[in-house]
Image (cartoon, rainbow, N blue to C red):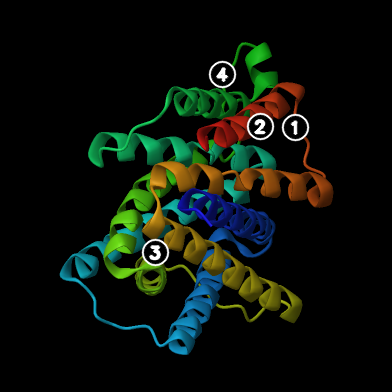
Amino acid sequence: MSTTILSILLGIGGMFGWGIYDFLGGVFAKQIGSFKSLFWSQLAGLISILLLAVVLRSSLNVPFVVLILSPLAAILYSAGYLFFFKGFEKGNVSIIAATMNLWAVFTMLFAFLFMGQRLSALQTLGVVMIILGATLAALNWSEIREQRFQLSAGVKEAVCGAFFFGVFWNVSEIISEEAGWLLTTLFVKFGIILFLLFFSYFVKQGIGLAKISTKTRIIILLMGGIEAGAVALVNYGLTIGDAILITPIASALSIVTITLAIIFLKDKVTKIQGLGIITAIAGIIVTAF
């Protein structure tokens, strides 16, 4: 199997894993709060990757640059999801998921500016489609018709999250090339848990699940394993390909998230916002070619 085909398949795996995780994250962010949902799912992901590392007997021969960049990657990833889940907590899951498509644009921008990677004409068109689609999906058009410009609830948080994710994936590509996909995922997950624990202490954010049903706890743990698998697949892809190809495919996760939100949550979107969602998703697909 060629490297390109394998990279595309790994990107698709990441797309489904993240799509399911983001949908469940949106559901539980509204039920138990964004921080608890993020912390416990990420802890479950860390345990999953740790068990995999033990089974595969992964070497701990870690280059110095990895030790320096891993904490940075963990902070970026944590910040991205903190903003993203906060957006879910406030707003419509479909609209927030569409807005988060901008992380592919940020990833490509940083890859272009700092890593020397370049876009084809078709990929550039895809980036423009993502930006246009995210803009259409993010605006509250009923307010605009009343001559009041207003973003939909949670969109500002989603844009901030997209920025942090965009920086993260370029840092993650460097780490993956140095340490391999498994250690990269393990170190980043470990750093995320440490960061979230420090964050919860300083902002006095509780993380207990005493009043949460057993069913909810189980699903949160399962979603953490699913998300860890998605990260591992994409990190593996980054060891054999370029972020500028793999991440746009994986970022089509909004197809999965939005479809699940419309089916199970009965999310309502206007025709213009629906057009924006479709345009953004189409743009992500175009950037893969």
Number of residues whose C-alpha sits closer than 10 Å to that of mark 1, classed few (under 14), some (14–19) or many (20 or more): some
| Mark 3, residue position | 203
Q: Furthest-front residue in view?
A: 1
Whole-angstrom CA distance, mark 4 to mark 3, is 32 Å
Q: Residue at x 49, y 82 (%)?
A: 52
| Mark 4, residue position | 149
| Mark 2, residue position | 277
Label whose residue precedes the other's in the sequence (2 or 4): 4
Label number found at residue 269: 1
Task: Indicate the secondary structure of the residue bearing disc 2.
Answer: helix
Q: Is residue 115 visible?
A: yes
Question: Which image quadrant for residue 188?
Answer: bottom left
Task: Indicate the secondary structure of the residue bearing disc 3.
Answer: loop
Image marks 2 and 1: residues in contact by CB distance under 8 Å: yes
State the image coordinates of residue 224 (x, y, percent, origin top left). Answer: 58, 70
State the image coordinates of residue 15 (x, y, percent, origin top left). Answer: 60, 52
Image marks 4 and 1: residues in contact by CB distance under 8 Å: no
Q: Amino acid at mark 1?
A: Val
Q: Amino acid at mark 4?
A: Phe
Question: Which of the pair 128/137 is nearer the observer?
Answer: 128
Label whose residue precedes the other's in the sequence (1 or 3): 3
Whole-angstrom CA distance, mark 2 to mark 4, is 20 Å
Left or right: residue 215 compared with residue 241: right
Q: Furthest-left residue in view?
A: 64
Labels 4, 1: front one = 1
Whole-angstrom CA distance, mark 3 to mark 2, is 35 Å
Left or right: residue 140 compared with residue 47: right
